[in-house]
Image (cartoon, rainbow, N blue to C red):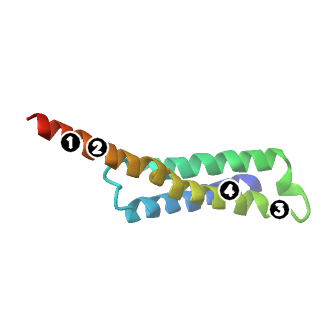
């Protein structure tokens, strides 16, 4: 049961980070609120599961890994995914709008 609580805490931390990243991004009107949150939670859960199945939660000296590593990876994902998706999408939308306005 202890490992389930570690997953709950990891998910809450990275979800909060995803919401904070979304609110601070100037291009957040281009993509939905779920993008940074979903990417952070999905990647953190995947890393957590791999670490738990590898047994790092029960090895002396490695018990920090299922806590800290998924949180760090999730926060990095919450920051990186909007950069990868948001800015190119903004450029594409502006180019498309310019093309449409030139036609009309």
**Residue drawn 39% across and 61% down?**
25
Precedes in sequence: disc 1 or disc 3: 3
> Which residue lies under the disc numbered 4?
70
Q: Which mark is residue 93?
A: 2
Q: CA distance from mark 4 to mark 3?
A: 12 Å
Task: Classify mark 3: helix, strand or loop.
Answer: loop
Mark 2 or mark 4, which is nearer to you? 2
Q: Are marks 1 and 2 in contact (CB under 8 Å)?
A: yes
Give the percent coordinates (x, y) of residue 72. 65, 61
Could you tell whether 26 is left or right of 66 in the image?
left
Q: How many marks?
A: 4
Sequence order check: which comes first, mark 4 or mark 1?
4
Q: Quadrant of the C terminus?
A: top left
Q: CA distance from mark 1 to mark 3?
A: 52 Å
The residue at 71%/59% (across/down) is: 69
In the picture, residue 24 is in which quadrant? bottom left
Give neighbour class at mark 4: few <14, some 14-19, many 20+ (Cα, 10 Å). Answer: many
| Rendering quarter of residue 61 | bottom right
Q: Position of residue 32 (x, y in %)?
A: 37, 47
Q: CA distance from mark 4 to mark 1?
A: 39 Å
Residue drawn at point x = 64 percent, y = 56 percent: 73
Question: What residue is pinned by disc 3?
Answer: 63
Q: Which residue is mark 1?
A: 97
Q: Earlier in the sequence, mark 2 or mark 4?
A: 4
Farthest front residue?
102
Q: Is residue 80 visible?
A: yes
| Label 3 packing within 10 angstroms: few (<14), some (14-19), many (20+) | some
Observer-nearest residue: 84 or 7? 84
């Amino acid at each position: 049961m202890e490992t389930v609580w570690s997953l709950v805490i990891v998910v809450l931390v990275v979800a909060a980070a995803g919401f904070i990243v979304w609110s601070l991004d100037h291009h957040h009107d281009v993509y939905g609120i779920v993008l940074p949150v979903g990417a952070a939670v999905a990647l953190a859960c995947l890393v957590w599961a791999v670490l738990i199945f590898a047994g790092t939660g029960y090895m002396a000296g490695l018990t920090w890994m299922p806590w800290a590593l998924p949180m760090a990876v999730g926060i990095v994902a919450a920051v990186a995914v909007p950069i990868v998706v948001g800015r190119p999408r903004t450029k594409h939308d502006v180019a498309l709008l310019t093309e449409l306005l030139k036609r009309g």
